[in-house]
Amino acid sequence: AEVAAASAGPVDVTDLKGMPRGGALGPGRFLFRGQMFWQELLPEHVATSQLEFRIGMGDDSRNFARISTAGSTLKDSPLEPLDVEHPLLIQSAMCVAQGREDEAEVATAVRGASS
């Protein structure tokens, strides 16, 4: 999984999988921040009940989640992560003024991945 970095180009974030962490959601857990498009749900994610899920079975065991899109133009979006240049992905990648219960863990993981 790659995320577009502001100046350094694509960054591989797969090294975050299995990184030891701890906090309010449990050791090694991060809040899944759902969007209107499908995103892969990793074992480290804690998801809320307001999401729509697709559970992987067989050869493709990946799990995906998104905010329910009933009545939206995104309701038939492909079950694949968006390309790193996709406008919806770029638009949703933003900093917010107020953190969530996993703020300290997320900050530690981002600092570790960027050093």
Image (cartoon, rainbow, N blue to C red):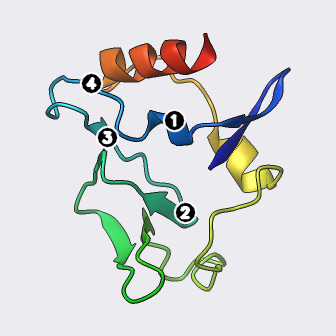
Foreground: disc 2 or disc 1: 1
Please identify the quarter of the rendering in which residue 75 is found.
bottom right
Sequence-first tag of 2 and 3: 3
Q: Is residue 109 above or below residue 35?
A: above
Residue placed most toward the observer, 18 or 44: 18
Amino acid, disc 2: Met
Q: Is residue 58 above or below residue 46?
A: below
Foreground: disc 4 or disc 2: 4
For the residues labelled 1 and 3, say whether their Cβ atoms are less than 8 Å apart. Answer: no
Tell me if mark 3 has few (under 14), some (14-19) or many (20+) residues whose alpha carbon lies within 10 angstroms of its own. Answer: some
In three-dimensional space, the C-alpha distance between marks 1 and 3, rounded to whole angstroms, equals: 18 Å
Residue at the (41%, 14%) spot, across then down: 108
Tell me the number on the disc at residue 84.
none
Residue at the (37%, 47%) spot, across then down: 32
In three-dimensional space, the C-alpha distance between marks 1 and 4, rounded to whole angstroms, equals: 13 Å
Label 1 sits on residue: 15
Residue at the (53%, 82%) spot, across then down: 71
Residue placed most toward the observer, 16 or 89: 16
Label 3 sits on residue: 31
Foreground: disc 1 or disc 4: 1
In three-dimensional space, the C-alpha distance between marks 3 and 4, rounded to whole angstroms, equals: 13 Å
Amino acid, disc 4: Arg
